[in-house]
Amino acid sequence: MIKLHDKYFEPFISRQEIDAAIAQMVENVKADFKEETPIFICVLNGAFMFASDFIKKYDQPCEISFVKLSSYHGFSSTGIVKTLLDVPDNVEGRSVVILEDIIDTGKTVKELVSMFSNINVKRFKIASMFYKPEVYSGEYNIDYVGIEIPNKFIVGYGLDYDELGRNLPEVYQIKEN
Ligand code: IMP
Ligand code: MG
């Protein structure tokens, strides 16, 4: 068990499970994009570790770029999504695959979809390492999901609790009481 700020967290998803899920996602994305050179867009900060492992396994021509939004503070979404680093300008006519850390309520996904909606991309897909299906209330159908998890707060593998825990190589779940 570990402590971050005032909360305790216990091991939840191992390195092996994460690796296996990413390998499967890479196979699915490769099958869909084999004739193209996709641009992977890593959503900072949380997806940096996932994006790094994902593209190291993606052994086909590809590019990587970054966007940065902000919305989440502590345990519950504030509902405010700001763009801190905008869509790169070379995506016109290209195939884009968003790499996201986790999809919770879907506010961030909605914002990402709208950020790209006024750009003429060839194809647009979203891949998320983790996904909370019980909470997601968005309209966009997530294209690639690594691991589905229940509605419980997690940290590690890029995900934070008030900025702590991103460096943990495995995923921990909050320990209630
Ligand atoms: P959404 O906009 O509500 O879907 O939330 C997505 C964002 O909230 C993610 O990109 C994360 O930064 C953050 N988030 C959602 N759930 C968790 C969690 O369990 N742990 C840490 N961050 C989370
Ligand atoms: Mg995030």
Image: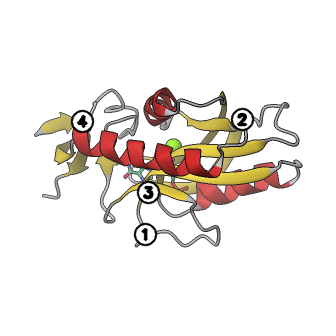
- For disc 3, the marked residue is 76
- For disc 4, the marked residue is 4
Using the numbered discs, state the Cα–Cα distance from disc 3 to disc 4 in whole angstroms.
Answer: 17 Å
Image quadrant of residue 88? Answer: top right
- For disc 2, the marked residue is 37
Q: Secondary structure at mark 4?
A: strand
At horizontal 63% and vertical 45% (from top left) the residue drawn is: 98
- First in sequence: mark 1 vs mark 4: 4
Residue 51 percent coordinates (x, y): 50, 34
User: Given contact means CB atoms under 8 Å apart, are the residues at marks 1 and 4 in contact?
Assistant: no
At label 3, which amino acid type do we have?
A: Ser
User: Given contact means CB atoms under 8 Å apart, are the residues at marks 1 and 2 in contact?
Assistant: no
- For disc 1, the marked residue is 133
Quadrant containing the C terminus is bottom left
Using the numbered discs, state the Cα–Cα distance from disc 3 to disc 2 in whole angstroms.
Answer: 37 Å
Front residue of this view, candidates 101 and 105 = 101
Density class for disc 1 (Cα within 10 Å; few <14, some 14-19, many ≥20) is some
33 with respect to 89 (left or right): left
At horizontal 43% and vertical 30% (from top left) the residue drawn is: 53
- First in sequence: mark 3 vs mark 4: 4
- First in sequence: mark 3 vs mark 2: 2
Q: Secondary structure at mark 2?
A: loop
Quadrant containing the N terminus is top left
